């Protein structure tokens, strides 16, 4: 794709995927693909500015209402929108309504005038993906229509076989690990017309699967540390992002 390969500013909006979970840093914060992409863009553009308004747990309506207006007002050269997956993973979901709110969010961001990038989120192999696959694919099919209306680029991470590999996912089985985020940053980098630095969709080397005991231990740990708390939040109507501010709420020079 031939595009303007010089970007001087970047705003990312969305949920935990764009916030950077679970690409953890030593201080307990998260980095993630958007920070990695910003660092690479800043290296070739003096004075490069970056904002990340994404907050974990946000639904697409919250992203549209809370993030997209401020993001569009920043007037960045590059804007990314990823959202809706938290909606379709809930027990009850009107996918048509999610699609409508996603289109509203994209329209708001398009008013800012920058290059809009949309993504089909990756899916981890396993029963969760299979259960929610029809909803996800209904949402992802809508992305092409939205992209055509707003001149957006679509990065298809969902079709990636490498990103479905459980080895690229964190222990919570909902978020990518550091290597997964690195590959997403490379995928977006290439999608916006910049020269490839690596094959982001290269399969991982073959490895012997863990034994039965190791798998059961991992399942128990996952249930105790991640699944039960997640169910608790759903039952009580809470979100992991309640009261949490964006990590980079202003479009400021990127300093790493």
Image: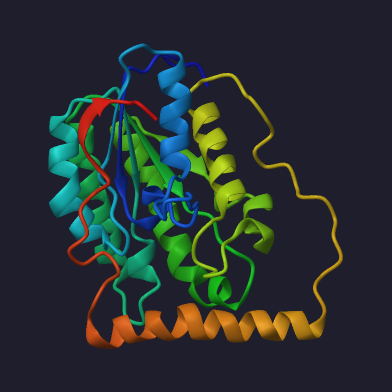
Q: Position of residue 139 (x, y in %)?
A: 39, 59
The location of residue 181, given as percent across then percent down, is 53, 46
* Nearer the observer, 227 or 107: 227
Counting from the top left corner in percent of width and height, residue 217 is at 68, 84
Dividing the picture into quarters, in which one does residue 211 lie?
A: bottom right
- Above or below: residue 94 compared with residue 39: below
- 80 and 24: which is toward the camera: 24
The residue that appears at 31% across and 64% down in the rendered structure is: 57
Classify residue 202 as left or right of residue 34: right
With 71 as the anchor, is 33 left or right in this view? right
Question: Which is more toward the observer, 31 or 11?
Answer: 31
Which residue is drawn at the image coordinates 37% and 69% (left, top)?
88
Q: Is residue 244 above or below residue 82?
A: below
Identify which residue is drawn at 55% across, 36% down: 187
Position of the C terminus by quadrant = top left
- Kindly indicate the quadrant of the structure image that contains residue 72: top left
Q: Compared to 233, does 12 lie above or below?
A: above
Where is residue 185 shown, x and y percent of the image?
51, 37
């Amino acid at each position: 794709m031939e595009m303007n390969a010089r970007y001087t500013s970047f705003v990312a909006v969305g949920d935990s995927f764009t916030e950077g979970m679970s690409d953890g840093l030593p201080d307990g914060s998260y980095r993630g693909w958007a920070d990695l992409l910003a660092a690479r863009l800043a290296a070739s553009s003096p004075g490069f500015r970056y904002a990340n308004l994404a907050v974990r747990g946000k639904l697409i309506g919250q992203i549209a209402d809370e993030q997209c207006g401020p993001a569009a007002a920043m007037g960045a050269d590059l804007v990314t929108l990823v959202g809706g997956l938290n909606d379709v993973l809930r027990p009850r979901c009107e996918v048509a309504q999610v699609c409508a709110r996603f289109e509203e969010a994209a329209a708001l961001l398009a008013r800012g005038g920058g290059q809009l990038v949309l993504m089909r989120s990756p899916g981890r192999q396993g029963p969760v993906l299979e259960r929610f696959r029809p909803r996800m694919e209904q949402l992802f099919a809508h992305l092409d229509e939205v992209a055509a209306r707003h001149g957006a680029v679509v990065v298809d991470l969902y079709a990636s076989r490498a990103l479905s590999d459980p080895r690229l996912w964190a222990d919570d089985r909902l978020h990518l690990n550091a290597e997964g985020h690195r590959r997403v940053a490379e995928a977006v980098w290439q999608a916006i017309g910049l020269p490839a630095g690596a094959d982001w969709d290269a399969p991982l080397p073959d490895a012997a699967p863990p034994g039965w005991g190791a798998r059961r231990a991992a399942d128990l740990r996952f249930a105790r540390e991640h699944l039960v708390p997640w169910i608790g939040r759903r039952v009580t109507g809470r979100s992991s992002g309640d009261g949490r501010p964006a990590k980079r709420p202003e479009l400021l020079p990127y300093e790493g």
